[in-house]
């Protein structure tokens, strides 16, 4: 087991160092709107005034919530963590995927951010995240969003230690998804969706949890078409 994890993390490190070559390709016509607010003065305001252009896809009340290491380190930067050059901006892998999903489905974007900062160095982050997981800590969130008006919530995040990062557990603590559709989308270096679907079902028994989608970190830069194809298959 330890050998497998070492291999996975070694692959992750390789992918992270290679991430500069990723290219986000063409930005679709629709742009997503950031929603949500921050609770602490130390966090950067995430609300944007940019309105999405009219979507031809099923409208809806769709929220695309994401968590990425790159927006949860000191100074909002995880220096050695994964970043992909996407649509002319450096983003965390999950953030790039969330942008693609939000743009195609016409959803609103929400960045799940923690009050605490995660270490900026990869090995320190790996140790920290492992300790947080083993201790069962659900870290306090710094950002909040009113999910009552959304019918569907995509949740986009990296796999950390074979499961979702602990801030995603806090996200589930804080919101009631009863009657809503939840769609997990992950980025990873071999674990795929890991235990996401079963965990989501366990945490939100009154929600409909879809099978979800995952993209390897190193492939995020070129994943736009594949994500679009998957979304089309889902009816978007
Ligand atoms: C703390 C930590 C633990 C990780 N654990 C796993 C894992 O168990 N399985 C896996 O496939 N990838 C793992 N990875 C790799 C990340 O899921 C992958 O690099 C992802 O693309 C990072 O997304 P981000 O840039 O949005 O943070 C881990 C990365 C970190 C930082």
Image (cartoon, rainbow, N blue to C red):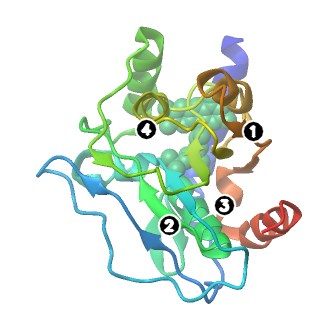
User: Which of the marked residues, 3 or 4, is nearer the chain's N terminus?
Assistant: 4
Q: Position of residue 236 (x, y in %)?
A: 78, 69
Residue 2 or 193: which is nearer the viewer? 193
Question: Label 1, label 3: how many angstroms apart (C-alpha)?
Answer: 13 Å
Q: Position of residue 178 (x, y in %)?
A: 59, 36
The quadrant of the picture occupied by the N terminus is: top right
Residue at which label 2 appears: 108
User: Which of the marked residues, 1 or 4, is nearer the chain's N terminus?
Assistant: 4
Residue at which label 4 appears: 122
**Residue at 25% in and 35% down:** 116
In this rendering, which labeled residue sits more in front, label 1 or label 4?
1
Q: Specify whether tag 1 is near ligand 1 (CB below 8 Å).
A: yes
Residue at which label 3 appears: 220
Q: Specify whether tag 3 is near ligand 1 (CB below 8 Å).
A: yes
Question: Label 4, label 2: how many angstroms apart (C-alpha)?
Answer: 30 Å
Q: Are there few (<14), some (14-19), or many (20+) residues within 10 Å of tag 2?
A: many
């Amino acid at each position: 087991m330890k050998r497998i994890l070492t291999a996975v993390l070694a692959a992750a490190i390789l992918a992270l160092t290679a991430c500069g070559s990723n290219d986000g390709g063409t930005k679709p016509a629709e742009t997503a709107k950031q929603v949500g607010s921050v609770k602490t003065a130390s966090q950067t305001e995430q609300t944007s005034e940019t309105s999405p252009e009219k979507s031809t896809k099923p409208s809806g009340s769709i929220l695309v919530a994401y968590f990425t290491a790159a927006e949860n380190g000191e100074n909002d930067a995880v220096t050695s963590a994964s970043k992909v050059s996407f649509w002319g901006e450096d983003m965390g892998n999950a953030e790039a995927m969330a942008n693609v999903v939000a743009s195609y489905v016409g959803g609103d974007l929400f960045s799940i951010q923690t009050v605490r900062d995660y270490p900026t160095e990869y090995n320190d982050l790996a140790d920290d995240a492992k300790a947080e997981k083993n201790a069962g800590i659900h870290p306090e969130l710094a950002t909040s969003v009113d999910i009552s008006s959304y019918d569907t919530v995509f949740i986009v995040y990296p796999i950390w230690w074979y499961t979702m990062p602990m801030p995603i557990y806090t996200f589930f603590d804080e919101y009631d998804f009863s009657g809503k559709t939840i769609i997990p989308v992950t980025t990873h270096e071999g674990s795929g969706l890991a235990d996401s679907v079963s965990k989501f079902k366990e945490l939100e028994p009154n929600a409909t949890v879809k099978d979800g989608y995952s993209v390897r970190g190193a492939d995020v830069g070129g994943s736009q078409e594949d994500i679009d194809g998957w979304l089309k298959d889902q009816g978007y």
